[in-house]
């Protein structure tokens, strides 16, 4: 079994952007990689979570359509806390912040 890099991706407004998709496909072309996308639920409350879910769903659909292996989750409204909640130095090899 080949080794795969595990990459944590933190994005909000840019989660479904062409630029981020290009960066991730370029990264995946360099070496096998799997991605974990975290979208902070900015704005807080139910409305913030619903907006984050919509951004997350759109981004994951585009990434998977491009052939990327991606897992995703909605994070804390504070981006630093969102990363802290998922961060595990034994799991992730790289971090991309968009």
Image (cartoon, rainbow, N blue to C red):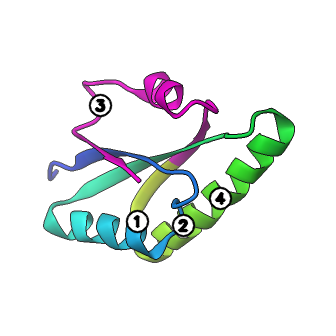
Residue at position x 25%, y 64% in the image: 28
Q: Residue 94: horizontal and vertical position, in percent? A: 24, 42
Residue 10: percent from the left, percent from the top?
Answer: 45, 45
Magenta segment boundaries in residue numbering:
72-98
Residue at (77, 42) in percent of width and height: 48
Residue 92 sits inside the magenta stretch: yes
Give the label, 3 or 1, closer to the camera: 1
Task: Indicate which disc, 4 or 1, sits on the residue closer to the N terminus.
Answer: 1
Measure the alpha-carbon separation of dots 4 and 2.
7 Å
- Was residue 74 drawn as part of the magenta stretch in this picture? yes
Closer to the N terminus: mark 3 or mark 4?
4
Residue occupying image coordinates x 33% and y 64%:
24
Is 86 placed left or right of 39 in the picture? left
Whole-number angstrom distance, CA of label 3 to CA of label 2: 24 Å
Task: Tell me how far mark 4 sits from mark 1, CA to CA.
Answer: 13 Å
Q: CA distance from mark 3 to mark 4?
A: 25 Å
Q: Do the residues bearing badges 4 and 2 touch, measured as CB atoms within 8 Å?
A: yes
User: Which residue lies under the disc numbered 1?
Assistant: 20
Answer few, some or many: residues within 10 Å of disc 4's Cα (few below 14, many 20 plus, some between 14 and 19): many
Q: Which residue is mark 3?
A: 91
């Amino acid at each position: 079994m080949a080794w795969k890099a595990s990459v944590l991706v933190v994005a909000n407004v840019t989660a479904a952007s062409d630029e981020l998709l290009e960066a991730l496909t370029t990264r995946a072309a360099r070496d096998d990689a799997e991605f974990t996308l975290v979208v902070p639920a900015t704005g807080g409350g139910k409305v913030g979570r619903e907006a984050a879910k919509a951004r997350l769903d759109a981004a994951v659909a585009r990434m998977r359509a491009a052939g990327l292996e991606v897992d995703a989750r909605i994070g804390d409204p504070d981006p630093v806390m969102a990363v802290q909640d998922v961060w595990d130095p034994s799991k992730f090899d790289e971090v991309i912040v968009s």
